[in-house]
Amino acid sequence: MNHTDELMTILMEECAELTVAASKIIRFGESKENLLRLQEEVGDVMCMLNLLHEHDFVSWVDVDQQADRKYEKLKMFSDLELA
């Protein structure tokens, strides 16, 4: 496995673990344990996102622009309480 394959594989695994943590909160509630697990998985995904940037797979400027576009869509199409 080359470095790109390893980075992408670990990224996928960490995103899957974050998905599971979110699912546990939906299924079993916002217990201290479930929220801690969610926080840990968010941290793991953030680490992988930073590595994507360090290895020049993503630009923070482009990512921030996309995040802003997504935020605007959420304001229009979701019931989330957004600023």
Image (cartoon, helix red, strand yellow):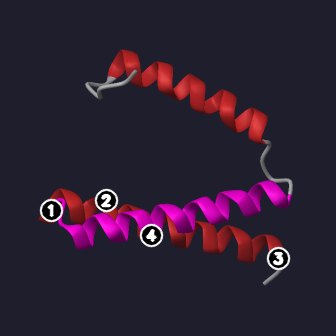
Counting from the top left corner in percent of width and height, residue 37 is at 35, 71
Magenta-drawn segment: 30-55
Residue 54 placement: quadrant:
bottom right
Residue assigned mark 1: 27
Counting from the top left corner in percent of width and height, residue 20 is at 34, 67
Q: Earlier in the sequence, mark 4 or mark 1?
A: 1
Q: Amino acid at mark 4?
A: Glu
Instruction: Determine the secondary structure under disc 4.
Output: helix
Instruction: Determine the secondary structure under disc 2.
Output: helix
Query: Which numbered disc covers residue 39?
Result: none
Say above or below: 58 vs 46: above
Q: Nearer the viewer, mark 2 or mark 4?
A: 4
Residue assigned mark 4: 40
Say above or below: 10 vs 47: below
Counting from the top left corner in percent of width and height, residue 33 is at 25, 73
Q: Earlier in the sequence, mark 3 or mark 2?
A: 3
Residue name at image x 55 percent, y 68 percent: 44
Q: Amino acid at mark 3?
A: His
47 in magenta = yes
Horizontally, residue 32 falls left or right of residue 14, namely: left
Instruction: Determine the secondary structure under disc 1.
Output: helix
- Count residues near mark 3 (Cα–Cα under 10 Å), then give few for <14, some for 14-19, many for 20+: few
- Count residues near mark 4 (Cα–Cα under 10 Å), then give few for <14, some for 14-19, many for 20+: some
- For residue 20, say whether it is visible: no
